[in-house]
Amino acid sequence: MKTKPVVVGITGGIGSGKSTVAKVFSLLGVPIYEADSRAKWIIIQNQELKNDIIALLGTEAYLADGSYNRAWVASQVFGQPALLQQLNALVHPAVRKDAQDWVIQHQEAPYVLYEAALLKGAGDGNLCDKIISVIAPIDLRVQRVKLRDNRSEEEIRAIIERQLSDTERIKFSDWLIQNDDQTPVIPQILQIHQSLLK
C-alpha cells in the first residue's frame, strides 16, 4: 500500500509572490495543486456544483455557453458576506474533494504543495499537514500587483485589507518565506525542501 504524501499548504496575500515561490518548488520536482485555478475549472465542469450555484444565485451565474459569469457573481456577493459564505460553502468542499483525489490517486512524491490564497492552519478544514506562508511588506506587494494587474493602488489595498494579515498568517505557519526583495528566496526554499525530504 502506497503511503500518502505529506500535504504542505503554501499561502500568502496578493503580491506576496506565492505563485513564484511555488514555481521554484515545482522545478525541484514537487507536484503542485493550484487550488484557485482548479476551483475555476470545477465550477464549470462539476454539474452537481453548477446546479447548487444556480440554485443559490440564479441562472445568471452562468453564461449561455456554459462558462461561469464571474463578474456578475462577484457583483452579487460583493458586500454580502452571508451570500459569499454560502457560495464558498458550496465551492470549497468540491475543491477539497478534488484535491484529495489528486493526492491519493495520482501522487507518489514524499510531499506535495497545495497552493491557495485562502488557507488557515493545517487541518483547519483543509487537507494540509503543514503550512508555508510567503510574506512581504505591504508597499512592495502593492507595487508588484500594480505592475502585474494594472489595478489602482486603492483597489489593491482594499483587497489586502480583506485578506488575512501577515501577523495572522505567521501564527499558523510551520515555515515562513521572506520575499522582500532583500532576503534571497532560493536558500529559504531549499532549506524547507530538505527538511520535508528527511
Image (spheres, rainbow, N blue to C red):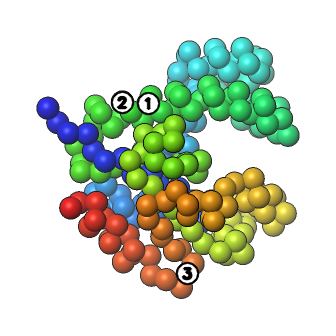
Q: Position of residue 31 (x, y in %)?
A: 33, 49
| Residue 171 in the image: above or below residue 75 | below
Q: Is residue 44 left or right of residue 25?
A: right
Q: Position of residue 76 (x, y in %)?
A: 82, 32
Q: Quadrant of the C terminus?
A: bottom left
Q: State the CA–CA distance, disc 1 to disc 3.
A: 35 Å
Counting residues from the start of the chain, the first of labels 1 and 3 encountered is 1
Q: Which residue is more in the foreground, 74 or 71? A: 74
Q: Residue at x 62, y 60 (%)?
A: 168
Residue hosting label 2 = 101
Q: Residue at x 68, y 21 (%)?
A: 53
**Disc 2 and disc 3 in contact, CB within 8 angstroms:** no
Q: Secondary structure at mark 2?
A: helix
Q: Position of residue 157 (x, y in %)?
A: 78, 63
- Give residue 139's quadrant in the image: bottom right
Residue hosting label 1 = 98
Residue hosting label 3 = 181
Q: Residue at x 62, y 25 (%)?
A: 90
Crowding near pointer 2: few (<14 within 10 Å), some, many (20+)?
A: few
Amino acid under disc 2: Asp
Q: Is residue 31 left or right of residue 71?
A: left
Q: Secondary structure at mark 1?
A: helix
Q: Residue at x 65, y 32 (%)?
A: 88
| Residue 162 in the image: above or below residue 189 | above
**Disc 1 and disc 3 in contact, CB within 8 angstroms:** no
**Disc 1 and disc 2 in contact, CB within 8 angstroms:** yes
